[in-house]
Each structure stands twice: as C-alpha cells, then as structure tokens.
Image (tube, grey):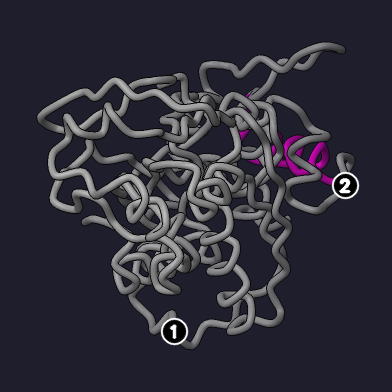
Amino acid sequence: MNMLHCLKSFLAVVDYKNFSAAARNLHISSSKISKQITWLEDELKIKLLVRSTTSLILTEKGYYLYKQALTLFEQLGKIKAIGNTEKLELKGSLRIYFTVTPMIPYLTSLSIEFIKTHPKLEINIDIGYQAVDVYSSEFDLAMTFDKVINQRLVCTQLFSVQRKIFASPAYLKEHGVPERLQDIEQHRCLINTLYGLQNKWIFKKNVISVTGNFKSNNADLLKQAAISGMGLIWVPCFSVRNEVDAGLLVPVLPDEISPEINLYAIYPKHLAYEEKIRQLLTYFYEQALADEIANN
C-alpha cells in the first residue's frame, strides 16, 4: 500500500473520530480505511488506535504518529508550492459550509467565478445558522465571522471588514443628513437582531443607542427596508456594495469607523495543505482586496 495514502486516512480518522465520517470525507469506503490503518500498524509494528463499538482511542504511539504525519504533510505542501501552481489543474470536490451572514452572496459569487477557471472542480455549498455547527459538519472548508476553537480544526483569519451606516436618498431628503454620531439617535434605525447587539451600534469612539420600528435577523430584509426609505442601516460595506453603486443607498458619516469584523476560514487539520483549499482562499483574499471590501 501507499504510505502517504494510509497516513492521510489515519489523519482523517483521528480528526473525525469515526471511520465512516473519514471515509465520506476522503470518498473511499470504510473497509478500505480499516485496511489502511491495519497496514500501517503492521508496517510500523505499533498499535495506533484502540477500537470499541462506540469510540476510537488514540494510543500514545498513535498520537506521536499523528503529530509527525501533520508535519510531513505540511512539508509536502510547501514543496508543492515551489512549483507554478497557477498551471495546476484542480480536480475533485470541495464541500464548503457558510454560516448565515451578509457575506454569503459575495463569497458565493467568488466561488462561482473560481469554479469557472477550474471546470473539473466540484463545489458543494451548505448554509447553517450557527458556527457551532462546524464542529459536527463533514466539510472541507467553512467560512464564518465566529472564531472556532477545536482540536481537529484549523481556524485562520482570512481578512477583516468594516461596518458603516447607509440610507436611501429618499430617507435623507425627508429626514435630513446626520452630521455627527449623536444625531443617529434621533433617526429611525433598522436593527439586526441576529448578533445580539439589539439597540447598540458600536464605533471606535462611541457606542450609539438606536431605535426603530423595523427589526429582523435577516440582513437582506433590512437592506430592502433601507432601500424603501424605512431608516438608517448599519452593515458591512460589502453587503450593500451593489446598492451603493446603483445609487439606491448612500454612505452616512463615512469617516466614522466601527471595530473590524474578522472573517475566518476553518478546515480539518489533515486538509491544511490541500491545494484546492489553498488556492480558493487565496482567490477569496485577493478578490476581496481588489474589490476594496477587505482590510489587510
């Protein structure tokens, strides 16, 4: 058997704590993974896993091999990166998990453009409501604004974005243009209930208490209300980019800065140097910078 293939299967079994989940992730059968683990144990003459009907326990030698194998695949990834990866043909599939955020339409459009340049690559996108879902999901890559800490996952900041205030020209014509942050408190504001901020808009120098008669946990509904002249909206700049370009919304107090929101990329440790993931994340990052959506 191929040692590298067997080691990759071993890493997947440890990460997913389950033969079936590892097999689905690697697109091979559970029986094949079982044979690969048995071959590794015979080849190395050590016991890697203690198996029961309900769990897998990593032995001390197994843990040592796991750490060494991660280092090995890290080095292999660096070796592959020496070549011209622009000419590398990407194949296979990528299962991507997005938590529900205003970033979904933008990241989806980038994913579509990426797959156009790699037609032999298949992308499957699932949407979930909570970052905690990534702990149990069988995905190759997840994107979320929530930092996730889990021993089997890599969580890395891809880039950060800014939230700013926007309104429709019609609303500003009727109610006037705010000249300072304190003026916002006298305006109707559209409130996003998803993130628990409720009636607080946070800026680097002030926290503003806002009120309004339209609330939602859905960013698209709030954006629709803002376009209709229902009030001011405080959102990440990328989520209203097309509406600003079309003149449907305009910035309000554009020099006021909110704390940055970090977008995180999350993937299983055994996929840390998977070329498909590396190239897709590089594409996300470079396009977000080019579109002036992301901060360095």
The crowd level at tag 2 (other Cα within 10 Å; few <14, some 14-19, many 20+) is few
Q: In the displayed structure, does residue 3 sit left or right of residue 232?
A: right
Residue 225 visible somewhere in the drawing:
yes
Q: Which of the numbered marks, if any, corresponds to residue 29?
A: 2
Query: Dividing the picture into quarters, in which one does residue 79 lie?
Result: bottom left
> Identity of the amino acid at label 2?
Ser
**Quadrant location of the C terminus?**
bottom left
**Residue in view at x 43 percent, y 70 percent:** 283
The answer to whether 277 appears left or right of 164 in the picture is right
Q: How many tags in the picture? A: 2
Q: Which residues are magenta?
A: 32-46
Residue 127 location, x and y as percent? Answer: 69, 43
Kindly identify the residue that appears in the image at 44 percent across and 37 percent down.
145
Q: Nearer the viewer, residue 46 or 237?
A: 237
170 lies left or right of 93: left
Left or right, 91 with reference to 185: right
Image quadrant for the N terminus?
A: bottom right
